Amino acid sequence: MRQTVAGPAQAPRATEPASPEVEVELELAGVRHGFGELKVIDRLDLRVGRGETVAVVGPSGCGKSTLLELAAGLSEPRSGRLSVEGVETAAGRLRRSAYMPQRDLLLPWLTAIDNAALAPRLRGLSRERARREAAPLFERLGLDGFQRARPAELSGGMRQRVAFARTLLTGKPLLLLDEPFAALDAITRADLQTWLIDALRAEPRTVLLVTHDVEEALYLADRVLVLSQRPARSLFAEPSPADRAQPRAEAVTDPAFVTARERALLALAGGEWPR
């Protein structure tokens, strides 16, 4: 059973991982960032424990995607400290994290399995060895039989699964997922949320997930971090009450889950955590 929602006095701060015994995989301390005169992130603190999934929600344009890019080492913060596995350099963060952007970015001239196998190919494996490494994931992720299909022949949900397989095959300990299901219809999105939970159970990783969907955040993550309007600052991080051993329909209608969802929506609407 998952931990139930605590009130503001009991809930962990955003700087705390889910458990003091868990080693910290990703840490931000006083991170600030912007573009020219535009301030995007303001004194953001966050600690994500190894094997933990943290979801980030916030208003559109508040800096959620920028946060992932900083964590991935694609840019450096203006100030503050940001590390992955204790390594603070951009190159070091890049070597330890895998970034999955909103669009699947599959290469249209490659088959599904060759798209997924790009990471092992970049490590120097031959095409056949890379395909053999990717093949078990295709069966596990419900893609068996579609190895030779081109991206244009796949549904949106299948394309997202190929993109996720490609992300897993990097072998990186930290996965940075930016709105992975945003372009999908509601039914496919719900199915893929359940699929993602199963996939991470089979291939455990540390995950920082950005989404605009509060229900998705609470269902997928161990903790949810709510950000303010730009420049983004942490309003609060609260543990999710979702019991992911239950079917999704039961988990998201549980009274504790509904209460947590309403509190998160109030935080987004009011710009502060509801008391």
Image (cartoon, rainbow, N blue to C red):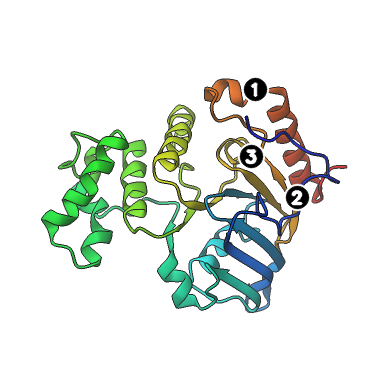
Q: Is residue 56 above or below residue 143?
A: below
Residue that numbered label 1 is attached to: 253
Where residue 2 appears, as percent x and y from the top left, is 64, 33
Q: Identify which residue is drawn at 46% across, 46% down.
A: 180
How far apart marks 1 and 2 lie (CA) works out to 24 Å
User: In the orientation shown, which residue stands out farthest toward the front?
Assistant: 21
Where residue 253 appears, as percent x and y from the top left, is 64, 22
- Looking at the image, residue 168 sits to the left or right of residue 109; the answer is right
Q: Are marks 1 and 2 in contact (CB under 8 Å)?
A: no
Q: Identify which residue is drawn at 24% across, 66% down.
A: 122
- Looking at the image, residue 256 sits to the left or right of residue 214; the answer is right
> Helix, strand, or loop for circle 3?
helix
Labels 3, 1: front one:
1
Residue that numbered label 3 is attached to: 214
> Helix, strand, or loop for circle 2?
loop
Labels 1, 2: front one:
2
> Helix, strand, or loop for circle 1?
loop
